Image: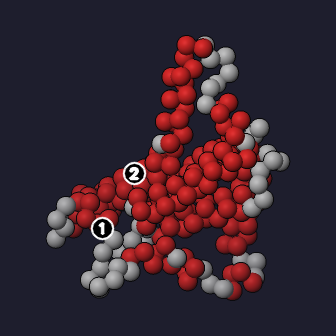
Amino acid sequence: MMSNLFSIFDPSTSMNTSINWISSIMFIFIISSSMWAVSSKMMIALNAMKMSLFNEFKVILGKSSPNGSLIILISLFSFILFNNFMGLYPYIFTSTSHMTITLSMALPLWMGMMIYGWINQTIYMFAHLVPQSTPGVLMPFMVLIESISNMIRPGTLAVRLTANMIAGHLLMTLLGNQTASSSGVILLVLINVQMLLIILEMAVSIIQSYVFTVLMTLYTSEIHSH
């Protein structure tokens, strides 16, 4: 029996070494190698999604974006999307519902952008701390506010993804516990609600992957827009 409701998100197994994190790369084994060699429907859909994201991120970043940034962002989207979907399968650990994974994705990327910006565009980074047409009296406060806003960005990205994935899984767990002790019409209603909830979670998985990547793209574009 669970000691508390959030214990379903504990990355622990009965073995000495936790193997829950294998779920982060499990999609590599599920996608058959033959799908990469032939034009299957799945690969056509993935390629169409990849090209759509490539064109959208290219517009946001502009022509001055560093080489390889689009590949990193599309790879980030794919990694989050696959892990979100893997968490919908029974008995598979959802790695994106843990701050260990989400913060490990957001913090290094944000820190890399900040280091790149302060080294290569120092004057612009200082100017970005004070918006245009700011009164002289408010300039010290705007610098403080903008600095805090930039510093909490990786935390907000990580918490947003984690909270959205945890919320849906908790609701599914609560309904699942009620289903085990229900019967008749109530059982039928709970099953239908769970089916609708799974569809909603699939949509949330796509949306949260997109939101995380788009926000990271916008943060990157702020540095390279000058």
* Discs 1, 2 touching: Cβ within 8 Å: no
Q: Amino acid at mark 2?
A: Ala
Residue appearing at x 62%, y 84% in the figure? 32
Q: Which residue is mark 2?
A: 163
Q: Is residue 197 left or right of residue 125?
A: left
Residue 135 position (above or below residue 41):
above
Residue 181 as seen in the image, left or right of residue 77: left
At label 1, counting other C-alpha atoms closer than 10 Å, the crowd grade (few under 14, some 14-19, many 20 or more) is few
Q: Residue at x 83, y 48 (%)?
A: 63
Q: Is residue 90 visible?
A: no
Looking at the rendered structure, the secondary structure element under dot 1 is loop
Quarter of the image with the C terminus in it: top right
Is residue 169 or residue 17 the one in the foreground? 17
**Residue 58 located left or right of residue 89:** right
> Which corner quadrant of the image does residue 39 belong to?
bottom right
Does 123 sit left or right of 96 as displayed? right
- Give me the C-alpha separation between circle 1 and circle 2: 15 Å
Image mark for residue 10: 1
Q: Nearer the viewer, residue 17 or 8?
A: 17
Q: Earlier in the sequence, mark 1 or mark 2?
A: 1
Q: How far from the left and from the top, in percent, is residue 223?
A: 69, 43
Figure check: 146 above or below 17: above
| Residue 123 locus on image (x, y percent) | 71, 35
Type of amino acid under label 1: Asp
* Quadrant of the image occupied by residue 118: top right
